[in-house]
Amino acid sequence: MASNFHFRLSEDLSLILDDADDYNVIIQVGENQNTKEFRAHSVILRARSPYFKVALSTNWITKKDNMIMFNKPNITPTVFHMILKYIYTGELDLTKQSGENILGLLVASDELLLEELFKHVRDYLIEKQTKWVDKNFVLVLNAVFRLDNCKKLQDYCFKSICENPLPFFSSKIFPSLNKEILFDLLERDDLQIKEVIVWDYLIKWGIEQTSGLGNENSDRAKWNNKDYEELKKTLNQIIPLIRFTEISRADFFDKVRPYRIIIPNHIYEEIEEFYYKDALPKTTILPPRTGYSFEIGKIESNIIKPILAKLIVNWIGNDQLYRFKLIYRGSRDGISNKSFREKCKGRVASLVLIKVKDTNKVFGGYSSIGFCSLGNDFTLINSDDYHDFRFYNSSDNFIFSFENSEDTRHMKISRVVNKSQAILDIDRSGFNFGWGSLSMNNINLHANNHSNNYENNLKTDTVYTIKEIEIFNISNQ
């Protein structure tokens, strides 16, 4: 019968470690004021660690009075004590260790080729998801991204940062973050932070990373062309990761424009066209970050992609933060004038989106005053036994069309021309922009603009059949 006496073996080896009288290795670890000498046995180190098996070979070792002398300044005394405890006894207790010590143990066990120990520490960090990670973002990232077989921990670190990014960006050691790590982070779509803040900290990081700038030359007013060119070299790979379309016009003017010289020309020209011509970039566009989108947050549309919603928000303008609340969907609530008017009453800023049958076209319109039953502020232009015709005033309304749910190349927008007749409230229509400029009559959609109350960019005699329709109420965050 086979028997195991591991506990007694571990206990005896622990005594050898703590009170060795026949040791033949002295290992000095740590640096500056935090150093310590440990006594060990080469036969045990070589048996337990492939690293020491090579490092303690006759070709590498330095001897003094027949004693092997070994230095490991990059490992702290606390961490090395845990390593020796594991090597001699197979025991390890991480519950009372600081996050910094656990991280140091992870890095050291990887270096010393202690695969079992490395996997245990890595899995412990993932399982516990300890709060210290949030306080030492840069320390963690710079360490774990040097390690193989650590992708899950890397993913956890990124996820932790994306959920609460400000402590990371504002930390004093953020400027020392490795460029490749920063690239991987800014490439993510789930970073929950305003894009203008990302831009601000990217500039700060670039300044600290650029020779000749930083503390010795932090006043931008004193920079010359060479300084800007050096900063451009530092940031050239990272700038394309910025979602410039998520930055407001005011912030673009105040915070991005002063650094125009460091932004590649094709990117800057496309962003200018976006802000001043309502044209989305064609080569540099990235989707809004799902965690934090500048104006729209998350728009729950089955008709358009988020990038088109971003463009619509830009048309609305005013550099506001908006929330879009879905209040009506044809496939859910029924496509009819009655169902529309029941769901979409009131003087509330609203967006309508329409997908029509037998084509990829998407139509829509924005009304700052809503669509129907808007109250007493109206002009009654006609009345009979069946209908009241009421026009409402708005200077902000517009209608638009896209060729499909994510294509901006053939987009069209028509803003209101006759502001006193921006919206017609009539019970034989669901909604009616300017008497037929864009209107719903049950399942039919018209865009004839016979009244010329809107610009003439969408005019068509085609009567489309509505396949899907959505209404969103819009409010400031």
Image: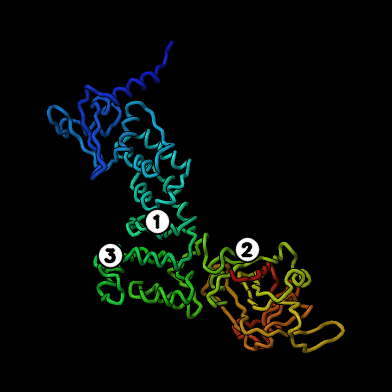
Determine whether label 3 and label 2 are within 8 Å by CB. no
Closer to us: 408 or 249: 249
Tell me: residue 261, above or below residue 149. Answer: below
Q: Of marks 3 and 1, which one's residue comes earlier in the chain? A: 1
From this viewpoint, which residue is outermost toward the top? 1
From this viewpoint, which residue is outermost toward the front? 33
Amino acid type, residue under disc 3 in the picture: Thr
Residue 332 in the image: state x and y as whole percent. 72, 62
Q: Of marks 3 and 2, which one's residue comes earlier in the chain? A: 3
Q: CA distance from mark 3 to mark 2?
A: 45 Å
Closer to us: 248 or 413: 248
Q: Please indicate whether residue 389 sits to the left or right of residue 298 in the image.
A: right
For numbered disc 2, what is the local secondary structure? loop
Give the labeled residue for mark 1.
184
Judge the density around disc 2: few (<14), some (14-19), many (≥20) Cα neighbours within 10 Å.
few
Task: Report if residue 335 is visible in the image.
Answer: yes
State the mark number for residue 197: none
Q: CA distance from mark 2 to mark 1?
A: 30 Å
Q: CA distance from mark 3 to mark 1?
A: 20 Å
Quadrant of the snapshot with the C terminus: bottom right
Quadrant of the snapshot with the N terminus: top left
Give the labeled residue for mark 3.
210
Amino acid type, residue under disc 1 in the picture: Asp
Q: Please indicate whether residue 112 sits to the left or right of residue 8 in the image.
A: left
State the mark number for residue 302: 2
Judge the density around disc 3: few (<14), some (14-19), many (≥20) Cα neighbours within 10 Å.
some
> Quadrant of the rendered structure where residue 241 is?
bottom left
